[in-house]
Amino acid sequence: MGMQIAPSILSADFANLESEIVKVDTADWLHVDVMDGHFVPNLTLGLPVVERIAEVSPMPIDAHLMIDDPDHWAPRYAEAGAASVTFHYEAAKDPRAIARDLRRLGARASVALKPGTPVDAILGDLAEFDMVLVMTVEPGFGGQAFMPDMMDKVRALRAASDAADQGLWIQTDGGIARDTIETVARAGGDVFVAGSAVYGAHDPAAEVVALRDLATAAARG
Ligand code: DX5
Ligand code: ZN
């Protein structure tokens, strides 16, 4: 796979979701931020909304669960139609068991690390995951500043995945835009969430293409 872009609908107009989704149909994934008001201090949407989004979206759904008790809830999002489900390591009782449940349901299994969570937490379990999400902001809100310090984690994951020939996807989320995406691509990231950068652009579909082109060129060196 090449460089992939996943626009976050957190920055879209929630009163017009279907038309907002179609605006980014040049994307590889549609990133859907599920927040429960407990794991993060913000509340967005849940299962019934994800189920309808999955029915109308031309792109597969990349669900990012910022919620407590993913051991129970993550598989429900795979059943609701998300092709990739990311849960937070910090909230999980048994990350390996969640990943196995997700794969059994036919979804890609992905684990997210908050900025304060070291990558060592999951380095021994990489074979269980299809993707790791390295948060480049504190989860909860769009429009925050990118944290370049997180690139050490991206590099460590890329090195570990390459050494084991695991083909792991490495996603970053938070502050990804034209001025930050090349830094991530050079560090080894290959799946990019972008909310405000895409939906704040006058042509969101073209912005997706521009971001993907920048990442592709940067990764080639
Ligand atoms: C934040 C969410 C992000 C958010 C990113 O917790 O996980 O997906 O939408 O927004 P930007 O791209 O504006 O930083
Ligand atoms: Zn997200």
Image (spheres, grey):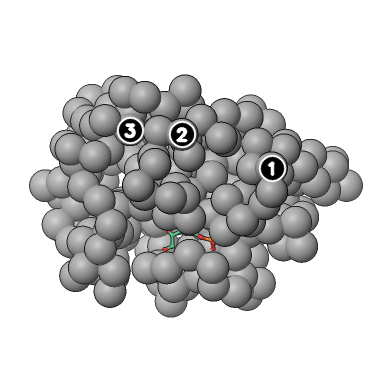
Q: Pick the residue in front: 72 or 28.
A: 28
* Residue placed furthest toward the right: 221
Give, as a three-letter code, the residue at label 3. Answer: Ile
Q: What kind of element bears circle 3?
A: helix
Q: Pick the residue in front: 205 or 128.
A: 205
Q: Looking at the image, which residue is at 26% across and 46% down?
A: 96
Query: Quadrant of the rendered structure where residue 109 is?
Result: top left
Residue 121 percent across, percent down from the top left:
38, 63
Ligand 2 within 8 Å of disc 3? The answer is: no
Residue 53 is marked as 3
**Mark 1 vs mark 2: which is more N-terminal?**
2
Residue 44 percent across, percent down from the top left:
28, 57
Q: Looking at the image, which residue is at 54% across and 68% down?
A: 143
**Mark 3 vs mark 1: which is more N-terminal?**
3
Query: In this rendering, is residue 170 above or below 187?
Result: above
Residue 203 is marked as 1
Q: Residues within 10 Å of mark 3 (few under 14, many from 20)?
A: many
* Residue placed furthest toward the front: 15
Q: Disc 2 marks which residue?
A: 19
Give, as a three-letter code, the residue at label 2. Answer: Ser
CA gap between label 3 and label 1 equals 21 Å
Q: Looking at the image, which residue is at 62% across and 49% down?
A: 198
CA gap between label 3 and label 2 equals 11 Å
CA gap between label 1 and label 2 equals 14 Å
Residue 6 is marked as none
Residue 87 percent across, percent down from the top left:
30, 51
Query: In this rendering, is residue 17 above or below 184?
Result: above
Q: Pick the residue in front: 60 or 118.
A: 60
